[in-house]
Amino acid sequence: MQNNLTELDSHKIISGMLATNKLGTFFGVSQEVMTKVWGALTAPAGDSTTYISMEIGAENDVYNPIKEKLKQLNIFAHKDTRIRRFSDKILNGPAKIPNYSGGLGVLAGDTLKSYADCHIPAIAISLLYRKGYFSQLVDSRAGQIAHNTEWSPERTPYLYLLKNPENPAEPLQIEVPFYERSAKMTSAHANLWLKMEVSADLDFFVPEILLDYSIPASPEWVRRSAEHLYESRSERAKIVQRRLLGAGVIPVMDALGITSNTIHLNEQHGVTVILHLIARRLKEKLGDDYPMISTDRQIQDAARYAAKRVVYTIHTPVIAGHDRFSKDLFADIGHPFCQRMLNILAEDETAPSLFNFTALAMRVNRSANGVSRIHRQVTQKQFPQYAKKIQAVTNGVHHLTWISPAKAELYDSFPELQDWRARPGLLANAEKLFKNAKFRTYLKQAWLTDTRILIDYINKMLVAHRNQMLTTWIDPPNFLSHLDERGHKLDPEVFTIGFARRFSTYKRANLIFADINRLTKIVVENHWPVNFIFAGKAHPADEPGKHIIKQLISTQRELYEKSDGLIKLVFIPGYDMAIAKMMVAGVHAWLNSPKRPLEASGTSGMKAAMNAVPNISTMDGWWVEGYHDGRTGWKFGAETKVSSACLNEEVSTLLYKEDSTSFYKLFPEILRAYYDETNRSELIDKCIMNIALNGPIFNSHRLAAEYAKIYAMNLPEDVENNLRELRKLYASNKETKNGK
Ligand SMILES: *Cc1c(COP(=O)(O)O)cnc(C)c1O
């Protein structure tokens, strides 16, 4: 790499990475790329997609092509102040944008990154949360403690406040009216922030528009409803937040001139956009008086028309994930005509006093899909009247984000895999390396590197927590922090199982600790030590979820003592994408124990698989497709036939006894695979088959290609050819036997 750039070089860099348009100046892509992307998003043909998501998880400290480029160019110390200003900010500025709570948001981020890599014209709209989701502290007695996330969009180098083209001294603002019963009450206003998901080669990007309603022009109650992702202080705050997203969509598109034919709802949170599409159609047909003169029939016709623009992805069968709000509450905030539309299109079959927003999204779309094959089945059971149109698009993860540096280096070192970044399908070639001794050795080394990184992090954390005890009132979340140095240290050679995700009850984080005596007996009899590494947040209003965190922490000591120190259960507070990346690559197996069939997909296991880490999972979500008859990992638990009855989420129906027993039967085999030298090579077989069988399927480039087909856009030939190749890797929708 060049160390001393000439003046000329630096100018090239600036002109190569700076782009200006009437909305502002942006760093990371060239003017040419800006013009191309913005051109596609605003072209009259409308061959683009507007992607609506309550959350978008794309942490810049985990994946960051712009920063990588800067590092490569080695321009940190350059004397040109313009370069320095940008590069300093990007290299040293805060990276976190607390805009996600879990899988849904990370999926959105991964999808958008793949859209950028595959040159699929798309723009995302989400909200900006001034206080984030929440930051998690964990105290061994109190359990999870939530506090506001401290951050500032103004100081975050990846966020740009869009300028008003008519008056560049002012920010561009949109207005969303709120109504009380009949009278127009007030307006919410939002500033628009732009973040770019840039492609790996910086030759394309997907803009995300984050609506910031926490500005003085908005009333206090709106600001308060917009502060936290999944605000839950009241039903009203919740519904206001949903409406801030849905009602913001058309104003944003209008303000920016976005022409997308397709509006993709990533979950139904922003579904009220549909009401605006319908109203717009009625206005075109009937004029300004449409609220007074529309008939029910005309509303239904307009809904059918609006449906042609809507693609809907449903992400969960869990009832808490389906928004239902009281009609009365909605009357407090929406125009009376919205009430009428909702009365026609969003009735809840079981509760006449509620509007059902999932039902609305399910009804008004041109394409609806679940996020795995089993989830398609479940969704068809939940919405039998739409069963025919419900498809499957199995989730995927952005391989460029989630494959660890050590594994990336491994894949780079073998010509069979080398171009895996642009063509994740090449990971299938790992099968050709199955018997390659060098590959197997390098794989083991890379794995150990990743394990060491994780275990080092944990050991440092345990010490830090111990020291904190002296200076704060927090009682560390890990029993090990109370032991002396020797007792608490984790060893990277010890078999390490990871589990991290949101703490929802159906995910059963504590399942394998249902019978501690039985678990410790397996470990003690064979003298096989085990590390269990857990992380995850429970929504602050989810008392049962928080209780599971507390319960996990309270079993640490018992596990340790009953196993003579062979079992170490560690909880890492503050789960985020950076911790996720370290965990999925560093553990020896990834545990997933939801009650089938409540986990629609799950994506953390896919991240592990791409890092060659086997999963141990119930047959739910993506694992039904990723298990490959045991060649990639292990299964346990009841394989109940999918029916409406098995969707019950009550604790008593969560099959703790059956499924934990099944786990204990399996567990010795798993430990033997690691500890018994004669079985160790079978474990490496499983690792390689994860790369070969699951890598090509569960990446978000393939996902992007499947969605691009649903979007039905006219794209340049080279783009379309690449998407066609990606679609050959897997067809989520293909019918399979026995729902597998
Ligand atoms: C991948 C990821 C998730 C989703 O994990 P699931 O297995 O789908 O529950 C949640 N949170 C973070 C930070 C992640 O990286």
Image: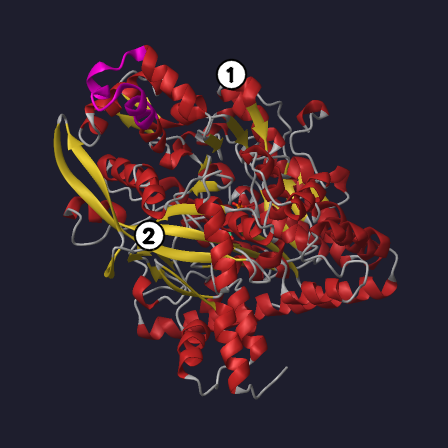
Expressed as whole percent of the image width and height from the top left, the position of residue 460 reads 50, 73
Q: Residues within 10 Å of mark 2 (few under 14, many from 20)?
A: many
Which quadrant: the C terminus?
Answer: top right
Expressed as whole percent of the image width and height from the top left, the position of residue 140 reads 39, 58
Pick the residue in front: 135 or 40: 40
Which quadrant: the N terminus?
Answer: bottom right
Which sits earlier in the primary sequence, circle 1 or circle 2? 2
Rendered image quadrant of residue 720: top right
**Residue at image location 40% in from the left, 30% down from the top:** 322
**Residue at image location 25% in from the left, 35% down from the top:** 235
* Colour convention of the picture: secondary structure
Secondary structure predominantly adopted by residues drawn in magenta: helix
Rendered image quadrant of residue 446: bottom right
Q: Looking at the picture, which amino acid does disc 2 mark?
A: Leu
| Left or right, 496 with reference to 419 | left
Residue 364 visible within the image: no
Residue 261 magenta: no
| Left or right, 24 with reference to 8 | left
Expressed as whole percent of the image width and height from the top left, the position of residue 134 reads 34, 54
Residue range corresponding to the magenta coloring:
278-296
**Residue at image location 70% in from the left, 52% down from the top:** 424
Q: Which residue is mark 1?
A: 384
Q: Secondary structure at mark 2?
A: loop
Q: Residues within 10 Å of mark 1 (few under 14, many from 20)?
A: few
Q: Which mark is residue 286?
A: none
| Left or right, 210 with reference to 652 | left
Relative to 38, residue 454 above or below? below
Pick the residue in front: 118 or 114: 118
Determine the CA span between mark 1 and mark 2: 36 Å
Q: Which residue is mark 2?
A: 128
Expressed as whole percent of the image width and height from the top left, the position of residue 420 reads 71, 57
Residue 293 magenta: yes
